[in-house]
Image (cartoon, rainbow, N blue to C red):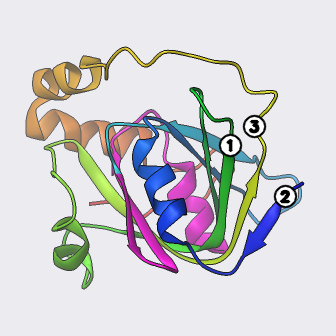
């Protein structure tokens, strides 16, 4: 049976820190719009306060989360244990993309190791926390983080990354213009 609370506890934060993978869900307001679900890793998630979280977002093949947050702010995070004790933790909130140069950038970026391929920081105010059993989640062993992204970013260089963002991260699947660095 799921349990609900209106803020993150120390136990929730400890669980989050122990996970190597989390998922981000968002959707546009338009009923025909595409729902987005993205896996994230790289020690990129931080609990900033009992009702405030953020993650460092690196350049990827799309930027749907930022488009959806600009549209309506709705965001869901999911963490699930793939080892030992089964558990699922969901965080429901309202968020926004914070870009280099934005007012909150310096404050938020201080919590992360910022890379040349850091696109933005997604910050969210959490209003509902849900835990549930993860009895149906299989057991997996964590091996390591991948380096492929960083090798790719290094080959692209600063100008190549800017061009890639312009080409691949400026428009959502649903045709919404996306603010970028």
Given contact means CB atoms under 8 Å apart, are the residues at marks 3 and 1 in contact?
A: yes
* Residue 170 appears in the rendering: no
Choose between 104 and 167: the one closer to the eye. Answer: 104
Question: Is residue 62 highlighted in magenta?
Answer: yes
Residue at image location 21% in from the left, 38% down from the top:
161
Residue at image location 11% in from the left, 26% down from the top:
154
- SS assignment at label 2: loop
Give the side of residue 173 with respect to residue 43, left or right. Answer: right
Q: What whole-number distance in Å separates the C-alpha atoms at marks 2 and 1?
A: 10 Å
- Residue holding disc 1: 87
Q: What whole-number distance in Å separates the C-alpha atoms at marks 2 and 3?
A: 10 Å
Pinpoint residue 140: horizontal percent, then vertical percent.
56, 16
Residue at image location 63% in from the left, 18% down from the top:
139
- Residue holding disc 3: 134
Q: What whole-number distance in Å separates the C-alpha atoms at marks 3 and 1?
A: 4 Å
Looking at the figure, which quarter contains the N terminus? bottom right
- SS assignment at label 3: loop
- SS assignment at label 1: loop
- Residue holding disc 2: 2
Would you place residue 164 above or below residue 156 in this image?
A: below
Given contact means CB atoms under 8 Å apart, are the residues at marks 2 and 3 in contact?
A: no
Give the side of residue 34 with respect to residue 82, left or right. Answer: right
Give the side of residue 95 with respect to residue 44, left or right. Answer: right
Question: Is residue 20 highlighted in magenta?
Answer: no
Would you place residue 65 above or below residue 164 in this image?
A: below
Mark 3 surroundings: few (<14), some (14-19) or many (≥20) residues within 10 A: some
* Residue 56 appears in the rendering: yes
Residue at image location 49% in from the left, 40% down from the top:
62
Choose between 71 and 75: the one closer to the eye. Answer: 75
Pinpoint residue 55: horizontal percent, then vertical percent.
39, 57
The magenta region covers 45-73
């Amino acid at each position: 049976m799921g349990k609900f609370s209106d803020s993150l506890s120390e136990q929730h934060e400890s669980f989050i820190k122990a996970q190597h993978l989390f998922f981000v869900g968002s959707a546009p307001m338009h009923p025909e719009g595409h729902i987005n679900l993205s896996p994230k890793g790289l020690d990129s998630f931080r609990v900033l306060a009992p009702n405030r979280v953020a993650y460092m977002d690196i350049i990827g093949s799309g930027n749907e989360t930022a488009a959806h947050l600009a549209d309506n702010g709705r965001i869901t995070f999911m963490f699930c244990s793939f080892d030992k004790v089964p558990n699922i933790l969901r965080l429901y909130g309202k968020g926004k993309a914070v870009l280099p140069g934005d007012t909150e950038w310096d404050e938020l970026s201080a919590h992360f190791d910022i890379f040349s391929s850091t696109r933005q920081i997604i910050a969210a105010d959490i209003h509902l926390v849900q835990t549930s059993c993860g009895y149906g989640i299989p057991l997996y062993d964590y091996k390591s983080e991948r380096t492929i992204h960083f090798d790719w970013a290094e080959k692209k260089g600063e100008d190549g990354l800017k061009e890639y963002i312009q080409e691949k991260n400026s428009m959502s699947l649903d045709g919404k213009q996306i603010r970028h660095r």
